[in-house]
Image (spheres, helix red, strand yellow):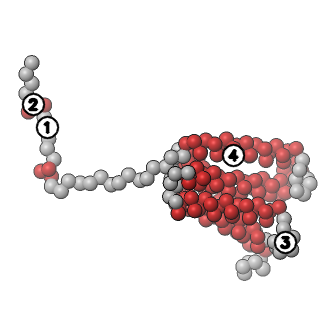
């Protein structure tokens, strides 16, 4: 039992949280390319990515028995996420914190997708047939991870160059009295040549 759930149920919840983090992270990533803030989705992405990294430590074997590579990725992800959250919420993306946030948020997304590729090659029969070792090391696995890495390097560079989120515009102020509006017509203006 883990947090009152069977291992199978906890694993399903962990997978749901991970996929939610990945999907919202991809939406946020493409939003960053367009300099959109997307505060709600960003909060969901960061929260679910923290949850997936932290909950991974509860899946046996526990960290205290023998640290696994997945635990090292989880520790790295949580450290990167701490910086991303600090940059996003404490510094409000001021100065260099803008690109630090972009880098750390997208590195945490990359780490989540890195683990997704590994798990896909371990759990999906068609992919497992291409790379049957545990952990997978065959060329199809290396090619898939290489494509993901190159994609993220290109996107991270593009986001760092483009991400310039602007604050929401202030609401327009209304004039207090309708007579404050003055209409001008062309008939009122006289022109002399």
Q: Decide: marks 1, 2 in contact (CB < 8 A)? A: yes
- Position of residue 186 relative to residue 163, above or below, is above
Residue at mark 1:
184
The answer to whether any part of residue 180 appears in the image is yes
Lateral position of residue 112 relative to residue 69, left or right = left
Q: Residues within 10 Å of mark 1 (few under 14, many from 20)?
A: few
Q: Residues within 10 Å of mark 2 (few under 14, many from 20)?
A: few
Q: Quadrant of residue 76?
A: bottom right
Q: Residue at x 61, y 59 (%)?
A: 84
Q: Decide: marks 3, 4 in contact (CB < 8 A)? A: no
Identify the mark nearer the N-term, 3 or 1: 3
Q: Decide: marks 3, 1 in contact (CB < 8 A)? A: no
Residue at mark 4:
152
- Position of residue 148 relative to residue 105, above or below, is above
Q: Which mark is residue 85?
A: none
Lateral position of residue 82 relative to residue 72, left or right = left
* Element marked by disc 3: loop
Q: CA distance from mark 2 to mark 4?
A: 61 Å
Q: Residue at x 33, y 54 (%)?
A: 171
Residue 72, position in %: x, y? 79, 63
Residue at mark 2:
189
Q: Decide: marks 2, 4 in contact (CB < 8 A)? A: no
Residue 35, position in %: x, y? 51, 46
Identify the mark nearer the N-term, 2 or 3: 3
* Element marked by disc 4: helix
Residue at mark 3:
61
Identify the mark nearer the N-term, 3 or 4: 3
């Amino acid at each position: 039992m883990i947090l009152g759930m069977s291992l199978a149920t906890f694993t399903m919840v962990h997978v749901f949280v991970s996929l939610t983090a990945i999907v919202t992270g991809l939406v946020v990533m493409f939003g960053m390319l367009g300099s959109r803030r997307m505060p709600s989705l960003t909060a969901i992405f960061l929260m679910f990515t923290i949850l997936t990294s932290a909950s991974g430590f509860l899946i046996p074997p526990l960290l205290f028995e023998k640290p696994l590579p997945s635990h090292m990725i989880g520790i790295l992800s949580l450290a990167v996420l701490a910086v991303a959250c600090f940059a996003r919420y404490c510094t409000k993306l001021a100065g260099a914190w803008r690109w630090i946030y972009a880098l750390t948020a997208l590195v945490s997304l990359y780490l989540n997708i890195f683990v997704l590729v590994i798990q896909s090659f371990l759990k999906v029969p068609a992919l497992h047939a291409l790379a049957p070792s545990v952990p997978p090391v065959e060329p199809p696995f290396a090619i898939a991870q290489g494509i993901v890495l190159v994609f993220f390097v290109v996107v991270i560079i593009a986001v760092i160059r483009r991400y310039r989120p602007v604050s929401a515009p202030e609401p327009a102020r209304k004039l207090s009295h309708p007579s404050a509006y003055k209409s001008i017509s062309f008939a009122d203006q006289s022109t002399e040549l």
